[in-house]
Image: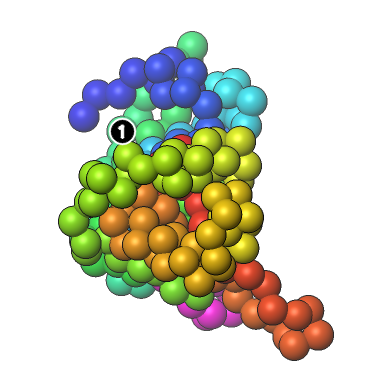
Amino acid sequence: MKHNLSDLIAQGEGSRIEFKQTISAAHRIARTLAAFANTAGGTLLIGVADDGRIVGIGSEEHEIQLIERATDFKVEPGLTVSYELVVADGKKVIVIDVPESDSKPHYAINEYGHRTIYVRSKDKSVPTNKLILAQVPTDKELWDSPTVRSLLQFLRQNESITHGQLGQLVNISEGRAAKLLRQLTEQGLLVMVDTPRRGVTEGIKPVRYYLKVS
C-alpha cells in the first residue's frame, strides 16, 4: 500500500496515528502496537518528531528488527503488521500499518515479563485491566438519542467520562449510566479503561470510558 506521507503527518497524532523519531526498545513500541490492534487499528510513523517534522531514521534495518521483535515476542498473541519505507527530502521514514485485530485482547510484555492490555485513547496508549469486545449489533435508535448526543459532545471536549459524570450530565442514576456506558462499549463506540490498581492506599480508581475513534 502506497502512503502519502504529507497527508498522514497533516492529520497529526491521534487515536489512529502516532509519530516516533526512533524506536528506543521493542517492549516500549509493543505498547503502541498492541493498543492499535486492541482498538481501531492505526499507523505508526518512525522518523517523524512529535511536532510533525520529518527527521528520518538512522538505520532501516535496526528499526525493522525492533518492530519484528515487538510483534513476535513483546506482544501476545503476536501481531502481523505491514510496513513501507518512504523517502521525503532525502530522509527515510518507516510507515507501519497495524490493523484492528480479530484476536483481541493483545498483551504488551514489558522488560520484566509483565503482561498488560493497552488500548488507544486519543494520542495515548493507556493500560487497562480488561477489554470489552464489540460483539453486539449497533442500536441506531440508542446512538441517535439525546443522551448519547450529550455524551458525545462531552467526550469531544473532555478526554474521558465515568458513570458518575454521565449520571450528572444527563440526570440519570449512576446504575443506569454504568449500564449505558457498557452497552455503548459492547457496540464499539467506546473503550473502557479499568485502571490497574496499585494498592489499597491509593483508593478505588473509577472506570473511565473513552471514544474508540476520536
Specify the farthest residue to the top. Answer: 89
Point out residue 104 in the picture as x, y percentages from the top left corner: 30, 66
Highlighted magenta segment, given as a residue range:
107-116
Quarter placement of the N terminus: top left
**In the rendered image, is residue 167 in sight?**
yes
Q: In this view, does 46 lie above or below 207?
A: above
Specify the farthest residue to the bottom. Answer: 200
Q: Quadrant location of residue 146?
A: top left
Point out residue 178 in the picture as x, y percentages from the top left corner: 48, 67
Q: Which residue is drawn at 29% across and 56% down?
A: 187
Relative to the observer, which residue lies in front, 161 or 173?
173
Q: Residue at x 52, y 26 (%)?
A: 12
Residue identified by numbered label 1: 84
Q: What residue type is labelled 1?
A: Glu
Q: Which residue is drawn at 53% across and 59% down?
A: 172
Q: Is residue 16 above or below residue 193?
A: above
